[in-house]
């Protein structure tokens, strides 16, 4: 092969890497992706963070996990056009109030973001990286700092803003009762006093300032902990991913084993309509039986079904912690990804004595507004280990998703705040099952497969 031909092949490769002309990282920033996809690292880390947003000019905004001081947001800008962040600035003239501060979304020219207790917005100016002026206060949470306190947001395009107010307990358990028998079943408060306002999705006016909880409308209830929520413009409906409850074995050792505690119950992919009740804390969803079951704190034994509540559109693996949801609307990726759902699985913390699981970005194909199959592995390699005994063993935990103006997919993680940009570099016409085979095989690694009872225990 002569030198001229080699040069032509190299130039052809770089051209095919991206229609944007970007040169991708040779190792995809450590990620494993379907054939035809590549990645580059936008930033090696902005600090512990949650969700991200990308503006139409390519500027990136990140919500930090911090509970003191000010400047709880980060803005990044690529100046020289190589896809890497050249400018990184912190901003945010508001008090940081907790590490569950989560949301960062761009809507109608505003940057919306949330601390644990307050939803804010600022007007964006594309000529300026940092929005000017004092943040406007939209919604104030009247309750004190508590567990599962993310204020995630979705917008219906008609002036409605949907805000998550998750429950702060596992199953509204009554911990005032002394349980002397180690095999006793923990009881739940009945009725649960949390669900008057919490464990719910509330609807507010996206333009009205200084709203309290009662200024909004409870849109749906019975959701334990929603971090990822979005409005799907394709079918004009609200969707969310819910963290299922924990501790089936711990709360009801007579009825559940440690293995069942690891693989149950499902996290849930939900289509949410006004008035829906998904049954928390009285029920949980069993994705193996594809049935909603009565929770043990309320008389369940793993066999009793619960009626009168809405089911998810798809049960997701237990404890994987789906923390962001994005319906892909771009044209850069192959057609099978159009209108499908990407989910950032933050990864489990409580599947002991079995391996922890998740730590990927998954994809769920959609057709006619419904999932056409199970979840797929889209991006892997975050964990950096074959077996994850404890959450701290994972190198990265996928957290935020955003779509760039060119159809690229941006992924962030929460430990260091590293950000990747995923770009398709192959032939869209030829993309099919052959390009997915490598990722299909990832389903059998320790942190993605269903563990075998009594065999996959970590000693």
Image: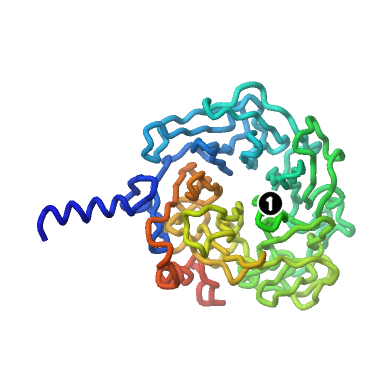
Which residue is most to the left? 2
Which residue is most to the top? 133
Residue 294 drawn at (x, y percent):
80, 70
Number of labels in the image equals 1
Q: Answer whether residue 388 is visible to the viewer in this image.
A: yes
Front residue of this view, candidates 66 and 204: 204
Front residue of this view, candidates 228 and 17: 17
Q: Is residue 22 left or right of residue 126?
A: left
Q: How is the image coloured?
A: rainbow
Q: Quadrant of residue 52?
A: top right
111 in relation to 310, above or below: above
Residue 423 drawn at (x, y percent):
42, 52
Residue 399 drawn at (x, y percent):
55, 49
Which residue is at a point 56% across and 67% down the rendered structure image? 375
Name the residue carrying label 1. Answer: 231
Which residue is most to the right? 191
Secondary structure, mark 1, is: strand
Residue 46 drawn at (x, y percent):
48, 37
42 in relation to 265, above or below: above
Which residue is most to the front? 429
Mark 1 closeness class: few <14, some 14–19, many ≥20 residues within 10 Å: many
Q: Is residue 56 left or right of residue 431?
A: right
Which residue is at a point 26% across and 54% down the rendered structure image? 12
Front residue of this view, candidates 36 and 47: 36
Q: Answer whether residue 182 is visible to the viewer in this image.
A: no
Which residue is at a point 78% across and 67% down the rendered structure image? 295
Q: Quadrant of the N terminus?
A: bottom left
Q: Quadrant of residue 121?
A: top right
């Amino acid at each position: 092969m002569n030198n001229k031909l080699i040069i032509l092949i190299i130039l052809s490769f770089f051209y095919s890497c991206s229609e944007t002309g970007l040169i991708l990282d040779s190792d995809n920033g450590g990620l494993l992706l379907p054939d035809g996809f590549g990645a580059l690292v936008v930033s090696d880390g902005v600090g512990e963070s949650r969700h991200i947003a990308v503006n139409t000019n390519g500027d990136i905004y990140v919500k930090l996990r911090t509970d003191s001081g000010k400047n709880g947001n980060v803005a990044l800008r690529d100046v020289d056009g190589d896809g890497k962040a050249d400018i990184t600035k912190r901003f945010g003239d508001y008090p940081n109030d907790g590490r569950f501060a989560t949301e960062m979304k761009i809507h109608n020219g505003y940057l919306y973001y949330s601390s644990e207790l307050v939803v804010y917005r600022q007007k964006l100016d594309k000529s300026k990286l940092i929005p000017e002026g004092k943040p406007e206060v939209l919604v104030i949470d009247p309750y004190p700092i508590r567990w599962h306190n993310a204020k995630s947001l979705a917008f219906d395009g008609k002036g409605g803003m949907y805000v998550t107010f998750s429950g702060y307990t596992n199953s509204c358990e009554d911990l005032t009762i002394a349980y002397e028998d180690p095999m006793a079943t923990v009881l739940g408060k009945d009725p649960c006093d949390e669900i008057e306002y919490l464990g719910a999705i509330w609807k507010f006016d996206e333009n009205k300032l200084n709203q309290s909880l009662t200024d909004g409308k409870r849109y749906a209830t019975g959701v334990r902990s929603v971090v990822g929520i979005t409005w799907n413009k394709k079918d004009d409906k609200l969707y969310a991913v819910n963290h299922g409850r924990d501790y089936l074995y711990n709360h009801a050792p007579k009825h559940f084993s440690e293995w069942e505690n690891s693989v149950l119950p499902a996290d849930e992919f939900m289509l949410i309509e006004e008035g829906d009740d998904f049954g928390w804390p009285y029920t949980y969803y069993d994705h193996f039986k594809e049935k909603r079951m009565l929770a043990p704190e309320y008389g369940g034994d793993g066999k009793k079904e619960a009626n009168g509540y809405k089911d998810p559109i798809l049960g997701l693996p237990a404890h994987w912690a789906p923390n962001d949801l994005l319906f892909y609307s771009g044209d850069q990726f192959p057609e099978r990804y159009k209108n499908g759902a990407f989910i950032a699985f933050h990864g489990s913390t409580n599947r002991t004595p079995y391996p922890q699981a998740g730590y990927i970005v998954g994809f769920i194909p959609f057709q006619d507004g419904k999932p056409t199959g199970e979840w797929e592995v889209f991006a892997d390699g975050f964990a950096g280990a074959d077996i994850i005994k404890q959450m701290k063993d994972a190198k990265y935990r996928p957290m935020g998703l955003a779509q760039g103006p060119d159809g690229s997919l941006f992924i962030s993680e929460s430990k260091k705040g590293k950000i990747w940009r995923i770009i398709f570099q192959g032939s869209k016409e030829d993309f099919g099952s052959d390009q997915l085979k490598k990722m299909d095989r990832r389903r059998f690694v320790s942190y993605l497969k269903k563990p075998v009872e009594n065999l996959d225990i970590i000693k």
